[in-house]
């Protein structure tokens, strides 16, 4: 029963485990990527919210600073606005943000008297309507009259982002107390004045927007996000962009959007907190600014303005510089998957290499055992013949001089064969131990080397019934190298041709000069080599299937030694073979410029 190797089975199991691990890791990375995307989006929402809150806080402080008492404003408008301007200067973080301050007086709102507050001389002086307020005035004049009440546009809008401006209405308030609660109500018909605070648009961008964008959306290596701010009433109008070439013009393309340019009621409540009655603590009261129109009963009240609208006049659109959070997370996921697959691939490759090394080691072990068996057989046969002949001679069995001569020739032949086997083994041992076979360097008479190789194999060829035909081809150039190593290599090739040739065959040995090269051809008409065996014949211990089937003795190391010697002489070896027709081995060596004279 054939024994099943365990390595392939273990390999299949481990590869299945690696595939399972890769699948689970891919799913896990997907879950991690989704969680990371949500975390980044939540963090970005928080940053965008804090950005809008800090921006709006500056507007709210400005709005509250100019929220003045109506009676005092009627008594001394210039002094009241001067105090309001001083309060704003003490609370603002952007000097010069207020570009101009106007006071609009009159029951008819936009058609009333407009006066300009001089920020340097702190006086009120008559003024024409500036171009920046034209659009707002036009809207106010065309508002419909409700139940005889003048159009109170400024009662419903506390900001106008087109100018940009803050519109602070100054109503007549009446306080209503009920226990711990206080409420302020007003009649729109009693509204008499409005403070219009025109903001410097360039300072709004340069000193407020840009620092806040850098604070909340820039990373250690520069801007992590692109920020685009558009008007909510006209999204095609870009108010600000951190990069004009990558402005986020469509809301779906943004990772996060948030509203800004609004009044923050929480900031109003914080800033309007007043000291307690004893000056020690802060009151817990909160003030909400609400303007209503009272009709015929308490159930018919209508809210006209109640602090911030909740959305803001501007919309900030934030997008990651990589395209989107989904894109950066997907890129990170692909990178992590690639690294993980690379690690798993290295593990799989390492396992495959270990299995391949184990199988190669087993193969080499088998080849070495076959080599030892072949060498033992190669040594045993000539030793047995030599011992048998020696015993016959020692016992006096052979008395005739002719028989003694024949026995002597037999002992010589087997001894030479034994010596050749030992030399091949020693040469191969020199290759495997990194020792070079080519030692002496000098000019070599190639014709003499060929003659010596043929002469050394003459007896073996005669015993096998094979003829070695040496075909001289004129005067041959010399080559540089080790004469003994080259002779051994050529003799090994010719010996193989003799060994694999049938009885009565001829082995042709030719040599010729071809330019700067010397070519030596050894051709036989023997077994030949299969095409599948040709790429492997120079490997140690390898023997072709035809040699094994014919049971031709050999160790499988001869050609590996030959190739090593030819390589050491800077030459090349080529084999052309057809199964059943024979083999031609071509040795090509670099020739010297001078010619060796043949005697």
Image (cartoon, helix red, strand yellow):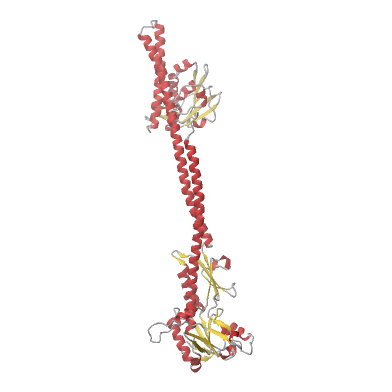
From the viewer's side, name the closer residue of 195 and 303: 303
Q: Residue furthest bottom?
A: 75
Give coordinates of residue 42: x percent, y percent. 49, 66
Q: Vertically, is 480 above or below 289?
A: above
Q: Quadrant of residue 379?
A: top left
Q: Residue furthest top?
A: 400
Give coordinates of residue 268: x percent, y percent. 48, 80
Give coordinates of residue 43: x percent, y percent. 48, 66
Q: Residue furthest front?
A: 179
How many numbered dots are placed on residues in this image? 0
Can residue 595 be seen in the rendering of this structure? Answer: no
Q: Vertically, is 196 above or below 582?
A: below
Can residue 35 be seen in the rendering of this structure? Answer: yes
From the viewer's side, name the closer residue of 441 and 311: 311
Give coordinates of residue 175: x percent, y percent. 50, 89
Q: Quadrant of the C terminus?
A: top left
């Amino acid at each position: 029963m054939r024994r099943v190797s365990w390595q392939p089975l273990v390999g299949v199991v481990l590869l299945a485990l690696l595939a399972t691990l890769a699948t689970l890791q891919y799913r896990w990375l997907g879950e991690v990527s989704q969680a990371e995307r949500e975390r980044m989006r939540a963090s970005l929402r928080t940053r965008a919210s804090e950005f809008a809150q800090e921006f709006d806080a500056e507007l709210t402080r400005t709005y509250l600073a100019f929220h003045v008492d109506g009676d005092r404003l009627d008594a001394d408008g210039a002094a009241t606005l001067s105090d309001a301007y001083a309060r704003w200067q003490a609370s603002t973080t952007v000097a010069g943000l207020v570009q101009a301050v106007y006071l609009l007086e009159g029951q008819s709102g936009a058609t009333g008297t407009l006066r300009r507050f001089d920020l340097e001389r702190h006086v009120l002086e008559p003024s024409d309507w500036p171009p920046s307020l034209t659009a707002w005035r036009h809207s106010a004049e065309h508002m419909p009259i409700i139940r005889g009440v003048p159009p109170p546009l400024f009662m419903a809008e506390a900001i106008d982002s087109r100018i940009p401006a803050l519109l602070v209405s100054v109503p007549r308030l009446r306080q209503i107390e009920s226990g711990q609660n206080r409420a302020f109500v007003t009649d729109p018909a009693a509204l008499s004045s409005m403070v219009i605070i025109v903001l410097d648009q360039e300072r709004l961008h340069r000193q407020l927007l840009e620092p806040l964008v850098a604070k909340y959306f820039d990373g250690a290596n520069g801007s992590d996000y692109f920020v685009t701010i558009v008007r909510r009433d006209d999204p095609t109008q870009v108010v600000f962009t951190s990069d004009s070439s990558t402005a986020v013009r469509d809301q779906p393309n943004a990772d996060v959007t948030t509203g800004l340019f609004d009044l923050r009621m929480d900031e109003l409540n914080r800033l309007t907190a007043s000291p307690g009655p004893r000056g020690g603590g802060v009151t817990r009261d909160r003030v909400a600014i609400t303007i209503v129109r009272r009709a015929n009963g308490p159930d018919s009240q209508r809210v006209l303005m109640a602090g911030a609208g909740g959305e803001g006049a501007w919309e900030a659109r934030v997008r990651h510089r990589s395209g989107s959070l989904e894109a950066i997370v997907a890129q990170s996921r692909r990178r992590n998957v690639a690294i993980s697959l690379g690690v798993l691939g290295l593990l799989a490759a390492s396992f495959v290499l270990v299995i391949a090394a184990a199988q190669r080691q087993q193969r080499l072990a088998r080849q070495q055992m076959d080599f030892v068996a072949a060498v033992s057989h190669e040594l045993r046969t000539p030793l047995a013949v030599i011992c048998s002949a020696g015993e016959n001679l020692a016992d006096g069995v052979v008395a005739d001089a002719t028989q003694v001569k024949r026995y002597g020739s037999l002992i010589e032949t087997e001894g030479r064969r034994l010596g050749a086997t030992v030399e091949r083994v020693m040469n191969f041992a020199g290759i495997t131990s990194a020792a070079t076979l080519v030692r002496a360097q000098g000019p070599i008479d190639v014709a003499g080397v060929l003659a010596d190789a043929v002469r050394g194999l003459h007896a073996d060829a005669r015993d096998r019934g094979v003829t070695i035909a040496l075909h001289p081809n004129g005067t041959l150039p010399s080559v540089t190298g080790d004469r003994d190593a080259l002779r051994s290599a050529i003799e090994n090739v010719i010996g193989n041709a003799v060994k694999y040739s049938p009885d009565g065959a001829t082995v042709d040995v030719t040599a010729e000069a071809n330019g700067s090269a010397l070519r030596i051809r050894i051709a036989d008409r023997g077994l030949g080599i299969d095409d599948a065996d040709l790429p492997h014949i120079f490997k140690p211990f390898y023997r072709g299937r035809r040699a094994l089937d014919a049971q031709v003795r050999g160790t499988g190391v001869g050609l590996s030694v030959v190739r090593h010697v030819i390589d050491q002489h800077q030459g090349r070896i080529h084999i052309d073979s057809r199964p059943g027709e024979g083999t031609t081995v071509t040795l090509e060596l670099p020739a010297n410029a001078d010619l060796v004279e043949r005697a």
